[in-house]
Amino acid sequence: MKSFGVFFWRITAAHVITYFLAGVCAAHFLNYKELFETAPYSGFMKPMNSLAVSAGPALQVIRGFIFSISLWWFRDVFLNTKYGWLKLWGLLLGLSVLSTTAAATGSVEGFIYTSIPFQKQVIGYLEIFPQTLLFSLIVFYWYQKPRKAWNVLSVILVSCILLLSTLAVILPVRSA
């Protein structure tokens, strides 16, 4: 079980950190506040100032756990092979982004079954592709070159993200 605990931590920490970084960058550079307030996104996305969006980074621990369980059985394929990071990234893009089982924006199902214009669907790729790539690289190289410093840094970063997310829920910023 120790090896699963290490795997769980690395997967979860890498996910929480890259999710937060990609989300902050996307919110700023893609202007998510305005994007989520206009159609078609306003029909299904919560506004950026909602408590759910504030809680989102902390709740990514749940997704990290799900990723850990799902990826555990295939870890040798991407941790112990050449270009393992690329295999992991391909798996994530294929199953989590492009071919979801729901009609999510940017997925094959989304293109087929929603009326959301193509340009509005692919804008999310500017956040999702780099985030999943960075996640895959971190997980792969963390196993290739494990160091105590990576563990310490991951604990500090995840703790800060969880604290910021919790504070944003408890002490929400009110607009004038």
Image (tube, rainbow, N blue to C red):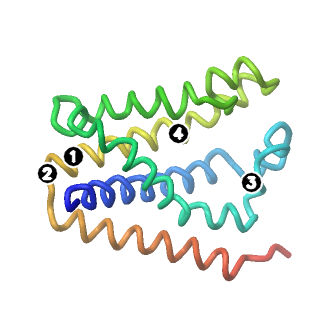
Quadrant of image for the C terminus:
bottom right
- In terms of sequence position, does the residue under pointer 1 or pointer 3 come before the other? 3
Q: Position of residue 86 (x, y in %)?
A: 30, 30
Cα separation, mark 3 vs mark 2, equals: 39 Å
Report the residue at 68% width, 32% height from top. 105
Q: Nearer the viewer, mark 1 or mark 3?
A: 1
Question: Mark 2 — residue?
Answer: 145
Cα separation, mark 2 vs mark 4, equals: 25 Å
User: Left of 98 or right of it: where is 85?
Assistant: left
Question: Mark 3 — residue?
Answer: 33
Question: Mark 1 — residue?
Answer: 141
Q: Secondary structure at mark 3?
A: helix
The amino acid type, in three-letter code, at marker 3 is: Lys
Residues at marks 2 and 4 touching, judged by CB atoms closer than 8 Å = no
Could you classify mark 1 by the number of other residues whose Cα lies within 10 Å: few (under 14), some (14-19), or many (20 or more)? few
The amino acid type, in three-letter code, at marker 2 is: Lys
Residues at marks 3 and 2 touching, judged by CB atoms closer than 8 Å = no
Could you classify mark 2 by the number of other residues whose Cα lies within 10 Å: few (under 14), some (14-19), or many (20 or more)? few
Question: Mark 4 — residue?
Answer: 128
Report the residue at 74% width, 54% height from top. 33
Q: In the displayed structure, would residue 42 be above or below residue 118?
A: below
